[in-house]
Amino acid sequence: MTQNDENKFKIILEYIKDLSIETPSISALAFVQQNLSNYIMDIDISSQVLKNKAIEVVTRLTLQDKKDVEEKAFFEIKYSTVITLDKSINDKNSVGKIVLCELQKIVYPKIEKIFLDLIKNAGYPDLNFEKKVDFDKLYNEKFS
């Protein structure tokens, strides 16, 4: 169990909920290896309250070529984190900031490493994620 520095929430459990790596053929593998720069990473974060007042947060990373090309691969990971909140946290804005920002700063580096290692082992050894995600900036852009 991991407790964050400000004691606003505790991580109870983490696991890979779903994983998909699809490369339909050797020709697709060769094509994608040459065109990895066309692949775009999307991040989606969802949450639901569980029976025991815990919250399950699912962070989904999808890496795909959004262009209409015949030869393509698809990569996705859904990583689930179950947290409990400190009893003093009771407003939606604080919960939203924890789920979408503070928790992600802790779990995202781990998710990114797992995802990148799996993709590299799936035949794409030259893949690297150049951009780092600024969760504070994303949160502020969306909710300010």
Image (spheres, grey):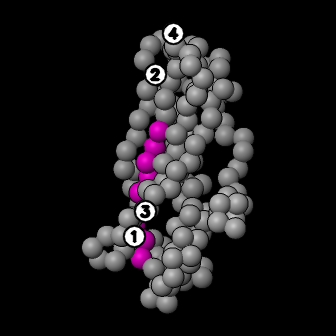
Please tell me whether mark 1 or mark 2 is closer to you in this view: 1
Compared to 44, does 82 lie above or below? below
- Of all residues, the one furthest to the front in this rendering is 144
* Residue located beneath label 1 in the image: 55
State which tag comes first along the sequence, 3 or 4: 4
**Residue 3's spot in the image, x, y percent?**
51, 77
Of residues 82 and 55, which is closer to you in this image? 55
Which quadrant would the C terminus be assigned to in this image? Answer: bottom right
Q: Quadrant of residue 40?
A: top right
Please tell me whether mark 3 or mark 2 is closer to you in this view: 3
* Residue located beneath label 4 in the image: 27
Please tell me whether mark 4 or mark 1 is closer to you in this view: 1
* Residue located beneath label 2 in the image: 23
Q: Residue at x 40, y 40 (%)?
A: 19
Q: Main secondary structure of the magenta part?
A: strand
Q: Are marks 3 and 1 in contact (CB under 8 Å)?
A: yes
* Residue located beneath label 3 in the image: 47
Q: Are marks 4 and 1 in contact (CB under 8 Å)?
A: no
Cα–Cα span, label 3 and label 2: 29 Å
Q: Residue at x 34, y 77 (%)?
A: 53
Cα–Cα span, label 4 and label 2: 9 Å
